[in-house]
Image (cartoon, rainbow, N blue to C red):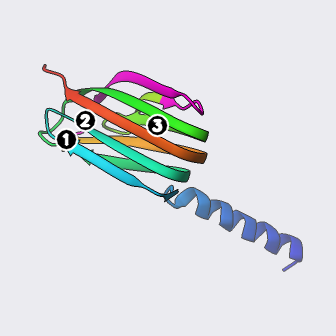
Amino acid sequence: MSWFSSTIRVTLIGLLAMLLLPACMLVSGDRLSADVRPDSGNVTRTFLGAEGTEEYAIPVGDGAAMLRTIVILELQQGEMRLDMLNAGGSVAFTVQSRPGDQVSRTGAVRLDETGTLRYRIVTRGARDGRYQILYQRVQQ
């Protein structure tokens, strides 16, 4: 086997591993505060530094439902994006940070049949950050 073909093989294996491995976020100084109830609640997370992507699940309970949510992001430097996910994984809405500013957005999110609220965080060089998710069940 030539050097060229072995280099291509190693590169392809590395690329496949990156695509198949679950996303991962490295976080330092992580602090979580949560008040989770079926009808309403909030989750607040602060960190000193964060890099990467991670999906989170909040077990709200009481089965499938629609929630009205408010997401608030604050970040001193770097980038942070929070995607609220509907049941099935589609993006309900996205909030993108602006360093030094507080950014918020309101939207509706559908819980899955187990009553789980899901969201994804994507960070790049994020420093001194905070996000808060407030939710309330919509009466149908």
Give the foreground label among 3 and 2: 3
Residue under numbered circle 2: 111
Q: Answer left or right for 54 relative to 100.
A: left
Which residue lies under the disc numbered 3?
Answer: 82
Considering only vertical position in the picture, is 24 above or below 140?
A: below
Which badge, 3 or 2, comes first in the chain's sequence?
A: 3
Q: CA distance from mark 3 to mark 2?
A: 17 Å
Residue shown at the point (38%, 53%) measured from the top left: 31
Circle 1/circle 2 CB separation < 8 Å: yes
Q: Amino acid at mark 3?
A: Leu
Which numbered disc covers residue 115? 1
* Near-viewer residue (16 or 124): 124
Q: Position of residue 80 (x, y in %)?
A: 54, 39
Give how far across and how far down residue 56 sits, in percent: 37, 49
The residue type indicated by label 1 comes to: Gly
Q: Are marks 3 and 1 in contact (CB under 8 Å)?
A: no
Element at label 3: strand
Count the marks: 3
Q: Residues within 10 Å of mark 1 (few under 14, many from 20)?
A: many
The type of residue carrying mark 2 is Leu
Rendered image: mark on residue 9: none
Q: Is residue 14 left or right of residue 137?
A: right
Q: CA distance from mark 1 to mark 2?
A: 5 Å
For the point 19% across and 41% down, which residue is it? 115
